[in-house]
């Protein structure tokens, strides 16, 4: 089956929403529900099943699984948008009697969600809607003739908590009628993205920890689940607890991601409990996924012949970018960036696969320019942007998380609309447009962008008294909550939040007003809206003036923070020689800090680029190769297989904290393509400007871009610097060599020496 499902709904819904559960105490977690219906069929030439649910579903026709969509129907704000999948089921139909069986789990709909463990976020029910059409006629539809049971083997299922499965209950004998519900069809939409599916798999190796635990090491941190194959007697149990790392003593731990008291439901155990039947037991969970590399085993079963396999589960995006160089640690860093993207692009881009699983706008905004190199992520990010549009508030404020995945309280309302986070509504479509050249992504999100800018402009007018001497103070954003330069390595996060609450973050927020207004002006021009283009160019110009007046001294920056230089250089807020002077000052700061960064969430992706582009490639490379904390290779030296949320996720003494699978700081992989190997594609215009350094020996990037395969490789050989560059068909490129030469070339492979 194609990983992009058919984009259509039935011409008419003859199906009804059916609730499989009997009246029960809504405070208690129900077992998974199993629904079934037998029906007669004759020989058909084509047959399609339209299906969706409240919760998650697995569907089987005559005992065969329908499709390979894991965690269907995916995640949305189900109150406003619920995707319907369409499957070709003609090969599974029989002449005569058939049976359609569907199992429903809690999923995002009513399971535990987010850092606060909210459940029943979209409702407390489960419900099924399906319609099977054969040769243009409805052969079967969900209605009151179906029957259901809660006596099946899945006794507990939850995306965060885990699953309890009793294999002795697989033969269900107790069934009861369903209840028809009037949930309507207005929120139903065709699926317009790729499916979530099982991807890579890793064999587990059993090890024994110092405190006597039996632990499985899969060798790769990922998002997914464990499959177990074991011989046992009926009633024997096996429990698996999933975690990302071992602690400082080499024992299993979940302490780095478990919010503990912040989760009102007692943490995130990532626990599977399996009760065996006699003989061979083969099992993997149905409605849970975890973030893990390790699994602790509790059982009295003989595991000498047992097999444990981890499955990576993520949206079905093909890898499009490959990088290698002469430094093994940098190669591992690229691997880690790729795997953190795989782990967190599960129908939407999320921050981590353990603690929150939230579609944070800020994370997507900083990573999207890198994501387009690594994998074909257009459908996933396009779908997520639709969620951002649905979640945007009436006043134009863009929320921090889309779709919602926790209870929205007063604090959430206050912190929504953070600069750099809300601006993802502009930054992500722009990154997709530059890579893919599709104007549709700009058209679809243009209204969201302009409403966001209108909100930002209104917010800027409420200038604090101390800044009103600025003649452009109506464009200085010095109020509202902003995460700012989040997670700077030497600034406590809570201190930064308190400072933002009391003082605002004018440097960050005003810079982003300029950046987004500048981009929307360009977007308006691309979309043939000249009046809008002029309007947003004027807004950008005024924000520029406000920034320079209050936040620089006639274009001169004075700060001991690296981000204060990176952002204005990267955004183009400085004029003439000011950018070079700021880059020189930034270079001095990095050197004084022993080639360690102190940037945070927003400016780190641009740090190496602005240094290298302003003549400080040697410093950029020393930052890239820094293997003490904070530095990208510190985690690599600690054995990381993914990118960490914080620079010191595993401290020198071995203690662990925070997520070990966040893609944000993996944005450095974008510089490996656009900087080290110099591949820069902007809406069909290709420039290749390699930034070479002998410390790597050689570097090679391959990008299966939307315009074809682009390759850029360089190597130092016998005192010479050699280049091999491939331009795809129907594309031209400008090659900018380190010796200053500029060579326009056409399609084909080209060789240069510098």
Image: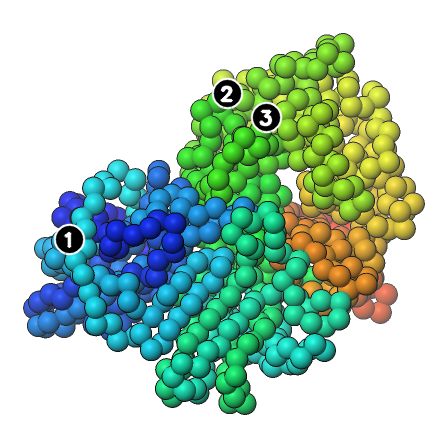
Which is more toward the observer, 651 or 11?
Answer: 651
Q: What is the spatial separation of the Cα atoms under label 2 and label 3, in whole angstroms? A: 10 Å
Q: Identify which residue, 330 or 125, lies in the foreground.
A: 125
Report the residue at 44% width, 87% height from top. 231
Q: Nearer the viewer, mark 2 or mark 3?
A: 3
> In the image, which disc is placed on residue 143?
1
Residue 554: image x %, image y %? 83, 20
Q: First in sequence, mark 1 or 2: give its number.
A: 1
Dot 1: element: loop
> In screen coordinates, is 199 left or right of 627?
left
Cα distance between the residues tagged 1 and 2:
51 Å
Residue 85, compared with residue 415, is above or below; it is below
In the rendering, at what x and y percent does residue 507 appear? 73, 27
Identify the residue at horizontal 63%, vertical 18% (top origin).
460
Q: At x 59% / y 73%, what residue is drawn?
A: 296
Q: Residue tagged by mark 2?
A: 532
Crowdedness near tag 2: few (<14), some (14–19) or many (≥20) residues, C-alpha within 10 Å: some
Q: Is residue 37 above or below residue 216?
A: above
Q: Residue 19: in sight, yes or no?
A: yes
Report helix, strand or loop for mark 3.
Answer: helix
Residue 694 location in percent, x, y? 83, 61
- Is tag 3's residue or tag 1's residue first in the polypeptide sequence? 1
Quadrant location of the C terminus in the rendered image:
bottom right
The quadrant in which residue 541 appears is top right
Residue 660, quarter of the rendered image:
bottom right
Nearer the N terminus, badge 2 or badge 3? 3
Quadrant, the N terminus: bottom left
Quick check: 602 above or below 395? below
């Amino acid at each position: 089956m194609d990983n992009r499902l058919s984009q259509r709904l039935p011409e008419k819904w003859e199906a009804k929403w059916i609730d499989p559960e009997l009246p029960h105490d809504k405070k208690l977690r129900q077992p998974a529900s199993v629904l079934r219906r037998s029906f007669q069929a004759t020989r058909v030439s084509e047959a399609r099943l339209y299906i969706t649910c409240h919760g998650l579903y697995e569907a089987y026709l005559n005992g065969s699984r329908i499709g390979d969509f894991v965690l269907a129907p995916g995640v949305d704000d189900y109150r406003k948008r619920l995707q319907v999948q369409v499957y070709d089921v003609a090969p599974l139909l029989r002449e005569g009697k058939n049976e359609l069986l569907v199992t429903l789990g809690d999923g995002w709909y009513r399971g535990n969600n987010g850092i606060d463990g909210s459940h029943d976020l979209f409702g407390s029910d489960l419900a099924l809607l399906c319609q099977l059409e054969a040769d243009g006629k409805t052969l079967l539809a969900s209605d009151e003739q179906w029957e259901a049971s809660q006596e099946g083997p899945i006794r507990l299922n939850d995306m965060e908590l885990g699953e309890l499965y009793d294999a002795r209950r697989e033969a269900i004998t107790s069934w009861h009628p369903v209840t028809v519900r009037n949930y309507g069809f207005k929120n139903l939409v065709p699926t317009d993205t790729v499916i979530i599916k099982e991807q890579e798999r890793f064999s587990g190796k059993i090890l024994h920890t110092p405190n006597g635990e039996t632990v499985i090491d899969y060798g790769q941190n990922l998002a997914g689940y464990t499959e177990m194959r074991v011989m046992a007697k009926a009633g024997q149990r096996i429990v698996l607890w999933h975690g990302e790392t071992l602690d400082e003593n080499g024992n299993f731990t979940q302490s780095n991601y478990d919010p503990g008291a912040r989760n009102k439901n007692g943490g995130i155990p990532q626990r599977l409990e399996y009760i065996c039947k006699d003989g061979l037991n083969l099992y993997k969970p149905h409605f849970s996924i975890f973030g893990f590399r390790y699994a602790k085993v509790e059982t009295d079963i003989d595991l000498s012949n047992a097999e444990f396999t981890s499955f990576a589960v993520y949206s079905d995006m093909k890898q499009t970018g490959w990088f290698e160089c002469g430094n093994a640690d940098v190669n591992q860093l690229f691997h880690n960036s790729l795997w953190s993207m795989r782990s967190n692009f599960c129908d939407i881009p999320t921050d981590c696969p353990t603690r929150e699983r939230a579609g944070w706008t800020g994370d997507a905004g900083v990573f999207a320019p890198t994501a387009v190199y690594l994998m074909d992520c257009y459908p996933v990010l396009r779908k997520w942007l639709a969620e951002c549009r649905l979640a945007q508030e009436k006043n134009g404020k863009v929320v921090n998380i889309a779709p919602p995945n926790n209870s929205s309280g007063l604090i959430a309302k206050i912190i929504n609309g953070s600069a750099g986070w809300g601006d993802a509504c502009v930054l992500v479509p722009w990154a997709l447009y530059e890579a893919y050249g599709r104007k549709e992504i700009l058209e679809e999100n243009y209204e969201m962008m302009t409403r966001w800018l209108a909100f930002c402009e209104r917010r800027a007018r409420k200038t604090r008294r101390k800044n009103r001497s600025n003649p452009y103070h109506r464009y200085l954003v010095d109020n509202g909550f902003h995460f700012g330069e989040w997670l700077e390595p030497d600034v406590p996060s809570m201190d930064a939040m308190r400072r933002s609450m009391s003082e605002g973050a004018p440097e960050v927020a005003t810079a982003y007003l300029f950046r987004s207004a500048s981009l929307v002006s360009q977007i308006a021009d691309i979309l043939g809206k000249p009046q809008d283009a002029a309007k947003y160019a004027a807004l950008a110009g005024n924000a520029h003036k406000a920034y320079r007046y209050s936040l620089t001294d006639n274009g001169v920056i004075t700060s001991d923070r690296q981000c204060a230089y990176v952002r204005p250089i990267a955004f183009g807020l400085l004029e003439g020689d000011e950018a070079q002077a700021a880059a020189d000052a930034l270079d001095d700061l990095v050197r004084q800090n022993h080639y360690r960064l102190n940037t945070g969430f927003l400016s780190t992706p641009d740090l190496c680029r602005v240094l290298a582009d302003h003549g400080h490639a040697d410093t950029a490379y020393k930052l890239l190769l820094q293997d003490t904390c904070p530095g990208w290779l510190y985690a690599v030296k600690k054995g990381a297989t993914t990118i960490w949320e914080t620079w010191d996720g595993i401290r020198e003494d071995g203690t662990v904290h925070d997520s070990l699978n966040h893609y944000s700081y993996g944005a450095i992989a974008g510089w490996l393509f656009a900087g080290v190997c110099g591949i820069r594609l902007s809406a069909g215009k290709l420039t290749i400007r390699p930034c070479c350094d002998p410390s790597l020996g050689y570097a090679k990037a391959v990008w299966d871009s939307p315009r074809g395969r682009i390759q850029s490789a360089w190597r130092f050989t016998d005192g010479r610097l050699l280049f091999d560059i491939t331009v795809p068909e129907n594309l031209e490129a400008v090659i900018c060599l380190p010796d200053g030469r500029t060579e326009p070339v056409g399609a084909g492979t080209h060789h240069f020496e510098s």
